[in-house]
Amino acid sequence: MSVVIGIDLGTTNSVVAMVEGGMPVVIPNEEGNRTIPSVVGIQKDGSRLVGSMAKRQIMSSPGNTAYAVKRLIGRKYKDDAVQKVAHLYPYKIAEAPNGDAYVVLNDRQYSPQEISAMILDYLRGLAEEYRGEKVTDAVITVPAYFDDTQRQATKDAGRIAGLNVLRIINEPTAAALAYGVRGKASGTVVVYDFGGGTFDITVLDVSEGVFQVRSTRGDTFLGGEDIDMRISEFLLSEFERQYGVDISDDRVVLQRVRDASEKAKIKLSTLKETEVNLPFLFADESGPKHLQAQITRAQLEQMVEDLVDQTIEHCKGALEDAGLGVKDVDELLLVGGQTKMPLVQHKVARFFGKEPNRTVHPDEAVAIGASIQAGILAGDVGDVLLLDVIPLSLGIETEGGMFTKLIERNKSVPISVTQVFTTSQDYQPMVNIHVLQGERALAKDNKSLARFELVGIPPAKRGVPKIEVTFSVDADGILAVTAKDLGTNQEKSVRIRPTSGMSEGDIEAAIREAEEYKKKDEEKREAVSLRNKAQTLIYATERSLAQFKERIPEEDAARIMEDIRNLKSALSGQDFKAIQEAFRQLEGSAVRISELVYEGG
Ligand code: AMP
């Protein structure tokens, strides 16, 4: 089997890894970075920038740059969670015809799946470049608490990117794999995973290569982003207090404030106090206005303590579900960038009564675990068995709008459950089944996954037809439904209407579009990368010219300066070939400097 990559598709950052010679390797991008910002910028002509390049254009084009779309994947626009934060994003979030949350960039709607696909495709490209071969198979991680729709949507994103998604695995389980396979661990391991957008807590039993998840809890809308938003709200209200103006509906302002908030938060992980300084944040008739504010670590902790406390409540729940107490925990692993916050480390250590294990890399453990799972599937890694669980119960709507569970949460996957349905009226030709996921008693409080219609039931008195419906959850945690008429022993046709997600037609259209843009994007990437290289070369050459002035003959210096001028002038235009030509020219003449310097000793 060819190589299979492991991808941690994160809210804030993503990481791609693979097993090589039996060891997991994290693949860096062109700039040598191992974590890739999960950011996508859409240009006016529809072409895309991904990763660091997109992150750099956030400030100049905040309305056309999407980040944190993982928070929207598999969610409805009207979800409370989405509504609560939508106004704090500098890009527009809109409602798709099926009610899903979409993002609007450069006047076009994109599903979060399409945006995620652009990130996945970029990561695949890094792996291909690194290996020098085509890569099509992947294992992608999701938060353990992702429901069926969110998992399916992540798989669809993989398909749009042209990836064959061999397995979806849970992020904490992946982190445990990264830790356990390397450390040959055994015992009860707790993985506390606080990332950019989501929080998960997972309890596992690890013994002789078997990783059995006992319980998992979490919140797919609780992460570092929420902490940043609290700081942003504080800064915006501070501005309003100082100047009496509300500036929270200006996209550029929002982006600058958000960016400064995250930076301040990260600084406060090591410093006790920091200053936020945003000159010329806003201007009106009375002139430019600057935002300046001091934030102390204590203030930040006060602002967000309730968010961290929510994670501790989930920890209690997960231990309870596993039937364990804090004393039973042998190892505590912290993953996700947000666990670098001292308040988080402090509260978690206090709750579990032990210090976390420091051998796992909080930013890379998930991707490494995904690559190990990829290695298992490719046959490169042996003697490891992963037994994951379904995070939320699955069931159907029954009499009086109640929710009846067929598969309880924390059951090991894959799992299959069968139930016999019948009709409630005489000669009823079909049965409607509403499938839901969640823990609440009333159907309406749970997430609606799909509606099924069992059609073509032969005429019979009520209660006579017997139709056996099987719910199967695969190793990815994704549900499939089949039905059989026990009278005729025939498979019944099941008409599925998923209540969310992209239709088959939408996905195929997105695949075509992704292929169409691939070439364009490649060109764009090359152009941006050439511009960056050209600017670096100009800077370095100008510096060397000044530094070694006495050792460079005048005619050489004049020629080099001429080449610098030409490259600068080419850079001010859009002609890629001209930039390429001028770059080569300067590259050639700049070599002369080092020759002269070294010749002269
Ligand atoms: P992840 O999804 O695991 O990449 O986590 C990203 C989140 O971690 C973002 O919200 C970051 O702002 C946050 N983060 C990264 N480094 C730090 C740090 N040193 N202190 C606090 N938060 C951090």
Image (spheres, helix red, strand yellow):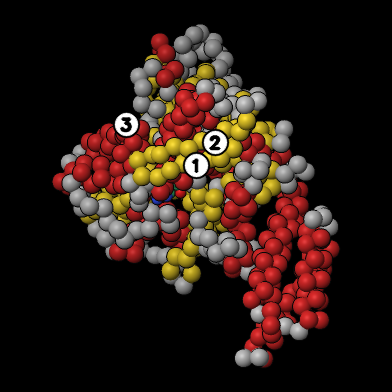
Query: Which comes sooner in the sequence, label 2 or label 1?
Result: 1
Q: Which residue is mark 2?
A: 290
Question: Badges 2 and 1: C-beta atoms under 8 Å apart?
Answer: yes
Residue denoted by label 3: 306
Q: Quadrant of residue 508?
A: top right
Direction top: furthest residue? 426
Secondary structure at numbered mark 1: strand
Real-space Cα separation, disc 2 to disc 1, in angstroms: 8 Å
Alpha-carbon span between mark 1 and mark 3: 27 Å
- Nearer mark to the viewer, of 1 and 3: 1
Q: CA distance from mark 3 to mark 2?
A: 30 Å
List x then y, in percent, for residue 438. 39, 27
Q: SS at mark 3?
A: helix
Query: What residue is pinned by disc 1?
Result: 277
The amino acid type of the residue labelled 2 equals His
Residue 129 vs 453, above or below: the answer is: below
Type of amino acid under label 1: Asn
In front of the other: 432 or 99: 99
Quadrant assignment for the N terminus = bottom right
Q: Secondary structure at mark 2?
A: strand
Q: Residue at x 54, y 36 (%)?
A: 290
Q: Residues within 10 Å of mark 2 (few under 14, many from 20)?
A: some
Q: Is residue 563 above or below residue 480?
A: below
